[in-house]
Image: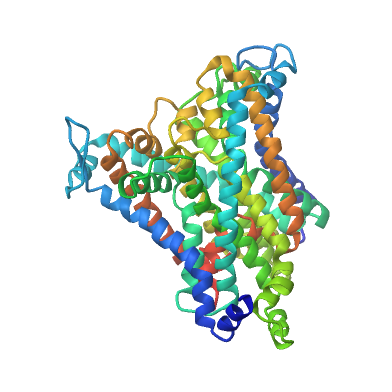
Amino acid sequence: MTLSHYTRNLLRVGVGITLAFIYIPLIVIAIYAFNGGNSLAWPPPDLTTKWFGEAINNTGARDALWTSIRVGAVATGIALLLGSLASFAVARFRFFGRETISFLVVLPIALPGVVTGLALSNTFTQVLGVDLSLLTVIAGHATFCIVVVYNNVIARLRRVSGNLEEASADLGAHTWQTLRFVTLPSIQTALVAGGLLAFALSFDEIIVTNFTIGAGEQTLPIWIFSNLFRPNNLPIVNVVAVIVVLLSIIPVYLAHRLTREEGVSARAGGAGAIAESTAIP
Amino acid sequence: MGRRLADLFHGRPRLQIGTLLSGPIAWLVIGYLGSLAVLLIASFWSVNAVSGELIKGLTFDNYKELLDQSVYKDVAVRTVGIAAAATVTDALLAFPIAFYMAKVASPRAKGLLVVAILMPLWSFYLVKVYAWQTMLASGGVIDWALDPIGLSGPGYGSTAVWLVESYLWLPYMILPIYAGLERIPNSMISASEDLGANPLRTFRSVVVPLAFPAIVAGSIFTFSLTLGDYITPTLVSPDTQFIGNVIFSQHTNNLPLASAFAVVPIIVMVIYLTIARRLGAFEHL
């Protein structure tokens, strides 16, 4: 598009404003991690690194971190299995109701979190009669993580034609051999990327977690949230917040590197999946 | 054994589909949709006022209470209002950067911008809310920045919720619009220019109409995620109630009422998704 210099610059200003809006709060919270004072007053009176040591030695935060990692890992495992099965069925077969699968997969993140949280906790405690625990948290996380894996794998399956699998079968490979030597290698990086994003999504989820977690259990976000109301612990919370950011940047960045060819829509939330539910002829 | 199983599947697509889908369908239909059904059923239960025990019968009292007490209506209207405001704000902030990424930036700059937008998409929700809580605190960054021009920040309250919700869900708006703009062929824009339209006219009559379904697709997320958020109001607007707060605080002592109130955002979202579908948001992304 031919744009005048003026328009171009105006657009750059708009880009700058949006980027500043996105990143200034993250920079502010990074600076607070070094806050030498004990209030939220800005600018911090002096800077110190002593809270990093305190945060690392805080057993509550460490236990919560370990809990989050375990929950994330199991939820990701379930999401990987269910998400890739569903994406394979939708991408490689035609059947009645195929269009609704994508919609079904995206529903848990398209509906307000408070609805999903309450619905799951109702079902666990009132219908199934199970006590809330980490297992119920995992079930909740897996539910809304499926879409991430699904989107990534289906984008890859669309790009890699099914002809390869047919060729493999024509050459005499049976179903397992085709799966092992043709299908899996071609979707490997999409699986890893989907898994990393699912883990990142689970790692800092709090809205549904709060409804489904058992008494006495804490994931890292729950630990942060409960300590926000204890002024004495705020310096440690600031440090933990920065650590959470750093820990979750890594999977998101790696996932991006692995799936650059697929474009953003595979990772742009469920919006892509909503489109799929009706766009397929 | 594996070989025999493989032979069993060979040439039987129905069996293959069934095997692939049984797990996901069981989880999502029985597990998830089933839970939503339970939520609906629980909204007709009641609570014994004395013992606090659940009475799993059928009563419309919860819905009556929601309709009779104006506080619930106020909370619902306020929440939907903030969700709409955050959605419009995000669309306005997202469009320029999405347009720049799709049609102006060099491939290298585009790649960097995509990473810059994707990074905060999936993660650190709570940290982002907390960052705003500190910035909005009295004597915090916002007060400090506005002080030289004689102003002070909005402090905690509905304005703060609007700001934070707009902030949280902005990437969910940028990426669909970017993807939508990428799909507009440059030749269409050139054609408009060749036919004598100035850039503003091209923008108004070609770019925006073609990108509109993508904006609506993005708005589904900004709107829905705001409707269901109760952490943000708890942290930056302790004295004002939103749908999420009411549901969360009620769900331990009056689960049926909380369930009935949770039907409100579900109805709002069903209406929203129906309109979004009419506007072509589903097809165009």
Q: Is residue A4 visible?
A: no
Q: Number of marks in the image? A: 0
Residue at the far front in the pictured view: B1
- Quadrant where the N terminus of chain B sits is bottom right
- Quadrant where the C terminus of chain B sits is bottom right
Q: How is the image coloured?
A: rainbow
- Which quarter of the figure has residue A173? bottom right
Depth order, front residue of A281/A199: A199
Indicate left or right for B91 with B273 as reference: right
Q: Is residue A277 visible?
A: yes
Residue at 63 percent across and 45 percent down: it is A200
Residue at 72 percent across and 80 percent down: it is A164
Q: With respect to residue A42, does B154 lie above or below?
A: below
Residue at 54 percent across and 82 percent down: it is B13
Indicate left or right for B270 with A5 as reference: left
Q: With respect to residue A254, does A222 lie above or below?
A: above
- Which quarter of the figure has residue B214? bottom right
Depth order, front residue of A121/A33: A121
Indicate left or right for A252 with B219 as reference: right
Residue at 39 percent across and 34 percent down: it is B245
Q: Position of residue B178 (x, y in %)?
A: 66, 57
Depth order, front residue of B85/A253: A253
Q: Position of residue B128 (x, y in %)?
A: 60, 34
Q: Position of residue A216 (x, y in %)?
A: 46, 30
Q: Position of residue B90 (x, y in %)?
A: 57, 46
Depth order, front residue of B67/B211: B67
